[in-house]
Image (tube, rainbow, N blue to C red):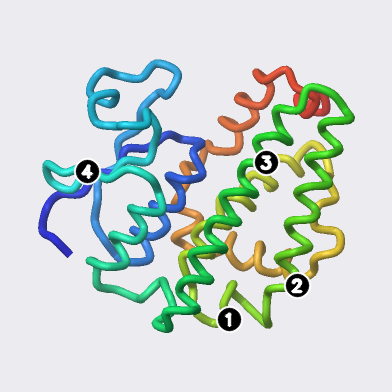
């Protein structure tokens, strides 16, 4: 790994930031974390982020954007445990499942922004279907690919973190038919890198964010 100082430009609720933070922790890489308000983006951030999004990883004077790129860079440059399989085919499959995690995050966005009960139920069913598809893929665990923690685990840990908050006020019933996924979720929640990827006030920050959406899910919070 380069000796350049690393800074992870973050937002408190961004699941993609959490992916990068988990990878950094798993690799044992030291870095600074800097938070930005995406509702009031500072000029320095606009100048650095081509897409206006987090995470950014500042590597000395260079800037990387997009969580998948950041995680791949860390995999290629940092010592520490490998987070991708050595076999090229398995590695490609893992990358595809990381994209599946991103698609699941898109469904979560649709779930918490749905304006009425019909749209809400459709997104709930979409999420349940995705977790049932995962159930058919998982082996004996405890992680996605067995005993070894991978970037797929880093991608899904922030997905599951959303449901820790959702389930504090409603049961979405998206894990009812997925015992392997439930066990995987529980194991990930206890891993130090996952626990440290979000600040301790994440649940309350997310509740405040959800209440402000005035969506169907928000109504369930009352």
Which mark's residue is nearer the viewer, 4 or 2? 2
> Whole-Å distance between the Cαs marked 2 and 3?
20 Å
Name the quadrant containing residue 108. Answer: top right
The quadrant of the picture occupied by the C terminus is: top right
**Which residue is depicted at the point 65% across and 49% down?**
104
Tell me the residue that label 3 is attached to.
108
> Whole-Å distance between the Cαs marked 3 and 1?
26 Å
The quadrant of the picture occupied by the N terminus is: bottom left
Along the line of sight, the residue nearer the viewer: 171 or 115: 115
Earlier in the chain: of badge 1 and badge 4, it is 4
208 lies left or right of 20:
right
Is the residue 125 above or below the residue 54 in the image? below
x, y percent for residue 202? 54, 38
Earlier in the chain: of badge 2 and badge 1, it is 2
x, y percent for residue 8? 30, 43
Earlier in the chain: of badge 2 and badge 3, it is 3
Earlier in the chain: of badge 4 and badge 2, it is 4
Disc 2, disc 3: CB below 8 Å? no
Q: How many marks?
A: 4
Name the quadrant containing residue 142. Answer: bottom right
Checking the image for residue 136, the label placed there is 2
Tell me the residue that label 4 is attached to.
58
Secondary structure state at the residue bearing disc 1: loop
Disc 3, disc 1: CB below 8 Å? no
Is the residue 202 above or below the residue 5 in the image? above
Secondary structure state at the residue bearing disc 2: helix
Earlier in the chain: of badge 4 and badge 3, it is 4
Mark 4 Cα shell of 10 Å, populated few (<14), some (14-19), many (≥20): many
> Whole-Å distance between the Cαs marked 4 and 2?
38 Å
Checking the image for residue 146, the label placed there is 1
């Amino acid at each position: 790994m380069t000796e350049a100082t690393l800074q992870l430009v973050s937002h408190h609720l961004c699941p993609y930031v959490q992916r990068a933070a988990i990878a950094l922790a798993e690799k044992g890489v030291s870095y600074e974390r800097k938070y930005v308000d995406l509702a009031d983006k500072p000029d320095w951030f606009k100048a650095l982020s081509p897409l206006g999004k987090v995470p950014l990883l500042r590597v000395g004077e260079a800037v990387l954007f997009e969580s998948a790129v950041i995680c791949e860079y860390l995999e290629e440059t940092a010592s520490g445990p490998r987070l991708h399989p050595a076999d090229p085919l398995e590695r490609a499959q893992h990358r595809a499942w990381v994209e599946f995690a991103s698609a699941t995050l898109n469904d979560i966005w649709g779930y918490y922004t749905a304006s009425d009960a019909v749209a809400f139920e459709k997104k709930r069913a979409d999420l349940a279907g995705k977790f049932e598809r995962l159930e058919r893929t998982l082996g004996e665990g405890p992680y996605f690919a067995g005993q070894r923690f991978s970037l797929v685990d880093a991608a899904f840990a922030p997905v599951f973190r959303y449901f820790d908050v959702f389930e504090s006020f409603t049961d979405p019933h998206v894990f009812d038919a997925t015992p392997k996924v439930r066990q995987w979720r529980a194991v990930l929640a206890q891993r130090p890198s996952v626990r440290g990827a979000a600040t301790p006030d994440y649940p309350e920050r997310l509740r405040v964010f959800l209440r402000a959406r005035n969506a169907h899910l928000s109504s369930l919070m009352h």
